[in-house]
Amino acid sequence: MVPPTPRRVTQRDIARLAGVSQATVSLVLNNRADADVRIAPETRDRVLRTIAETGYAADPVARRLAARFNRIIGVFTYEPAFPSGSRDFFHPFLLGIEEYAERAGCDLLLFTSAPVVDGRRRIFHQDNRLRLADGCILLGREIDAAELHRLNRDGFPYVAVGRRDDAGGPVPYVGADYAAAVGELVGLALTRGHRRLAYLNTELTAESSADRRRGFVAAATAAESARHLTTVGRDAEAILDDLLAEGTTVAFVEDFATAVALALATRRRGLSVPGDLSILTLGDPTVPVPTDLAFTGFRIPREEMGRQSVEVLASVIDGSAVGVQQRLLPCELVEGDTLGTPDRRSTAAER
Amino acid sequence: MVPPTPRRVTQRDIARLAGVSQATVSLVLNNRADADVRIAPETRDRVLRTIAETGYAADPVARRLAARFNRIIGVFTYEPAFPSGSRDFFHPFLLGIEEYAERAGCDLLLFTSAPVVDGRRRIFHQDNRLRLADGCILLGREIDAAELHRLNRDGFPYVAVGRRDDAGGPVPYVGADYAAAVGELVGLALTRGHRRLAYLNTELTAESSADRRRGFVAAATAAESARHLTTVGRDAEAILDDLLAEGTTVAFVEDFATAVALALATRRRGLSVPGDLSILTLGDPTVPVPTDLAFTGFRIPREEMGRQSVEVLASVIDGSAVGVQQRLLPCELVEGDTLGTPDRRSTAAER
DNA sequence: GTCGGTTGCTGATACGTATTACCATCTCTG
DNA sequence: CAGAGATGGTAATACGTATCAGCAACCGAC
């Protein structure tokens, strides 16, 4: 292993050239002007001139070792950060993260080296370089609670993108207020006259999923009937049978692809969306699904979540944040074409 | 500035717990088994057990300071790395870079903090953190020669994505062989009977542009006429006039958007592509342009360029590379619908 | 029992920067 | 002109790891 650097300019070199001590160079560089640190203007100038001449730049590694602060923000993703799917789910988050990092003058360290163990990436592994960063941002649908636990224990500054349950203490996060958004959608459906609602969920473990269900349950108390169906292992036809049998007029669908499939099945049966069945989606697609329908639902403020996660992390790192930072950002409702009124069809027939 | 870390486990702690010296801990950790470094198996086990118990992880900063090697690859882009345009030009490069970095166990450091000066980002600036990385990858249509110069002078390992002219010495790069690809296209056009060719370029400075032109010039010697036109400041109509006046039958167009505009203009005039004019593109679009035409041209192996740039950089860093690394990857020809035969129209009329 | 060789480990030091305690020197005051 | 106070700088040390010269202890051979 040959040292890659032939020899680089250090503060010691500057000091020698300027006829001062290394400490003086450091003091000049850091613009120290405390009560007990004084540098004569001409000395300062001489040092600065020498620095300019040599093109010296401080070694960030040594600086970090000594000062324990580096203006580097780690980004940990549980999936590749640059995925193939162009309309990818992570992309907007990263966009916001990069934007705010640039504004804050921070570099981003992507932990691409994190190995996959048991089907998912791990933060903590042999020889992890987490601590090179001043703090880190965690991206992923599900984040291992044990790893959050360890981050908490180590006192390493971090922020999760998306709300997280406690893991050995409260978890700092910047999330989307799914509960409120779903609640609003339910309210909208009730206003339009819907009384028989159904909630279709896929996964069960993720917080983002639980929050949506919670929002549904809380807002649907005024409904005649509010059922929960799982879509796991069932095809759209079977689900549709189920919905129609109970006289459901509006379905709240967690997974975008399921909503598309359900709409297709409805049409295949000669029924219309939203004439016979209203279908609401609960967030943007996570995988690209082609559809000609403009679904009614809400938009997750992903870019803004990225931005604010960096903002929060920065405040945690520099100590200006008090307590555990937890933010929920509002989701914007999207009025599409898939929410109708339950009686529209009969009204049309009466005409 | 409160120290963010309360207190972390160090080799010294391990050493104390295991009853050995810090040096021994380091030796065990690095699996040293040289002739003059010997650790008794039981000592080694004891140290390893202590490490496991405490959950110790080496501080990458200190490691880097001592060993000058960190398995971190810097990525410098002259534009935001995560751009808004979904079909972005940089994206495939980053995809390849990430993929190979993951395989090589390297992390990626995005220099988002690089400030914009005079309309472009700068690698070297006050307080740059370049040296945190073991080496870096440079992405950008045009890269400042002065900055390359300085990288060369400093002996900092780097690789440019895309061929680069010398800048105070040869520049290591992984590029696409534009000259060969354009040459092949010219050959194809000649085979189809074209004799009057035109080359339409936009910018002049970038190496990628010069390579294409060079390929054109070298291969077009067999043609009756091979002209160069600039598209800068001219609209598609004027260019088309020019082409038709000279009896040009095939246009090699550097910029994808220009090709689209030219095809539209041709059609507006009641002429057909490729019946009256063949239009060839010289690489993928850099900005998304909607078109229903499948252009004949070639594909830049961008993902592979990303992968290999990391591969090359890694070999430069670990010293296994001899000399300056320069690679040109072949571009894949794409047979679309925009290359015809110059006499097809008259043949059709004779029938 | 002395001498060369081997084994297993440690002490010292380097890496480059930040910080603090402290030391000269000069200036002012009574 | 002694003492206090201000001024301008330096030496020393810390940060955590890697490396290497070298030391002690033991072994075997003559």
Image (cartoon, coloured by chain):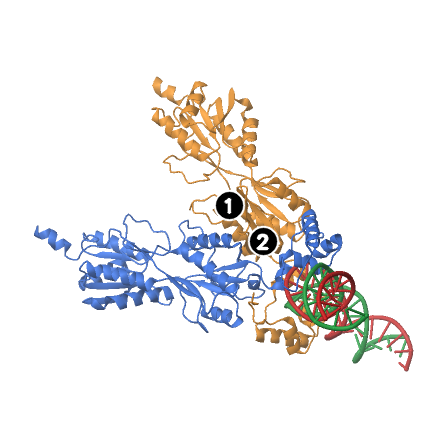
Chain colours: A orange, B blue, C green, D red
Mark positioned earlier in the residue sequence (2 or 1): 2
**Picture quarter with the C terminus of chain A:** top left
Give the percent coordinates (x, y) of residue B343.
14, 57
Left or right: residue B201 versus residue D27 is: left
Give the percent coordinates (x, y) of residue A134.
62, 54
What is the chain letter for disc 1? A
**Picture quarter with the N terminus of chain A:** bottom right
Residue B65, relative to residue D10: is it above or below? above
Left or right: residue A104 versus residue B84 is: right
Q: In which quarter of the image is residue B252?
A: bottom left
Numbered badge on residue A21: none
Numbered badge on residue A73: 2
Residue name at image x 20 percent, y 60 percent: B191
Residue A162, relative to residue B141: is it above or below? above
Give the percent coordinates (x, y) of residue B307.
44, 56
Looking at the rendered structure, the kind of residue marked 1 is Glu
Tell me the crowding category of disc 1: few under 14, some 14 to 19, or many 20 or more residues within 10 angstroms, Cα based. Answer: some
Q: Name the residue under label 1.
A: A79
Residue D11 or B318: which is nearer the viewer?
Answer: B318
Residue C9 or B65: which is nearer the viewer?
Answer: C9
